[in-house]
Image: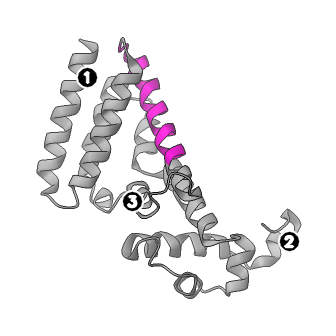
C-alpha cells in the first residue's frame, strides 16, 4: 500500500475506478477468470497504478468483499431504525425481490472459487459471514429470541440458500418461500 502522502499522487479517482471495474468484472466473469489485464483496462489505469493501490489481486478481492459487506443490501436493511427488530429480520428476505439483488452473491461466489479454508480470500468470506451472523444475532436478541445465536444461524443459512436458489429458480417463488420460512423460524423462536 502506498503511504498516505503518496496516495493523492496516484491519480484522481483511480482506487474507486478499480473497485467499480472489479465489481462489474467479478460479477460477470468470476474472481478467478478475471485477470489483472482485464482489471487495469476496465478501470482505465496502468498496472503500476493498480498495484500501488492493491498489492495483489487477492488484496483487491478482499477489499471488494469488505465493501460489499458494509454497503450490500443486507447492511442497509439491518440499519433501518424505523422497524422493529423482528420486522427488520423479515425485511431482509423481502429485499431479495429487489432486482439489484438478483446477481450472484459475491460472498457465496468467492467461497466457491476459493474453497481452501486457509486461503486469504476464503478467510475474508468467513469473517464477513461471521459478521453478518453477529448482526442477525443482535437483532434476534433485540426481538427477544430466547436463543438468538441459533435463530441467527438459521436465518443466515436460509438467506444464503435463498441467494443461491435465486440463480436457478423463479425469483418471486424463492422470495415468497424464503420469507415464509423466515417468518416460521421467528414464530418458533419468539412466540
Which mark is first along the chain, 2 or 3?
2
**Residue shown at 49%/38% (left/top)?**
130
* Along the line of sight, the residue nearer the viewer: 84 or 38: 38
Crowd tier of the residue under label 1, counting other residues whose Cα lies within 10 Å: few below 14, some 14–19, many 20 or above = many
Residue range highlighted in magenta: 126-145
Write down the residue under mark 1: 186
Whether residue 189 is situated above or below residue 45 in the rendered picture: above
Which mark is first along the chain, 1 or 2?
2
Q: Which mark is residue 112?
A: 3
Q: Position of residue 146 (x, y in %)?
A: 36, 11
Residue 45 placement, left or right of 70: right
Q: Secondary structure at mark 2?
A: helix
Q: Position of residue 72 (x, y in %)?
A: 44, 52
Write down the residue under mark 2: 6
Residue 43 placement, left or right of 105: right
Foreground mark, 1 or 3? 3
**Residue shown at 37%/18% (left/top)?**
143
* Along the line of sight, the residue nearer the viewer: 113 or 168: 113
Amino acid at each position: 500500500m502506498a503511504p498516505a502522502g503518496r496516495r493523492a499522487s496516484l491519480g484522481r479517482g483511480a482506487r474507486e475506478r478499480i473497485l467499480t471495474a472489479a465489481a462489474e468484472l467479478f460479477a460477470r466473469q468470476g474472481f478467478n477468470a478475471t485477470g489483472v489485464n482485464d482489471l487495469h483496462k476496465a478501470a482505465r489505469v496502468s498496472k503500476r497504478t493498480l498495484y500501488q493501490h492493491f498489492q495483489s489481486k487477492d488484496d483487491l478481492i478482499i477489499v471488494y468483499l469488505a465493501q460489499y459487506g458494509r454497503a450490500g443490501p443486507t447492511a442497509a436493511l439491518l440499519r433501518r431504525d424505523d422497524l422493529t427488530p423482528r420486522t427488520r429480520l423479515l425485511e431482509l428476505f423481502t429485499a431479495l425481490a429487489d432486482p439489484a439483488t438478483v446477481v450472484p452473491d459475491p460472498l457465496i461466489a468467492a467461497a466457491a472459487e476459493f474453497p481452501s479454508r486457509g486461503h486469504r480470500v476464503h478467510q475474508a468470506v468467513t469473517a464477513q459471514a461471521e459478521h453478518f451472523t453477529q448482526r442477525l444475532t443482535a437483532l434476534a436478541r433485540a426481538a427477544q429470541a430466547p436463543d438468538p445465536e441459533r435463530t441467527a444461524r438459521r436465518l443466515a443459512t436460509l438467506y444464503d440458500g435463498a441467494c443461491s436458489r435465486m440463480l436457478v429458480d423463479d425469483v418471486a417463488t424463492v422470495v415468497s418461500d424464503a420469507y415464509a420460512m423466515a417468518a416460521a423460524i421467528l414464530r418458533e423462536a419468539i412466540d
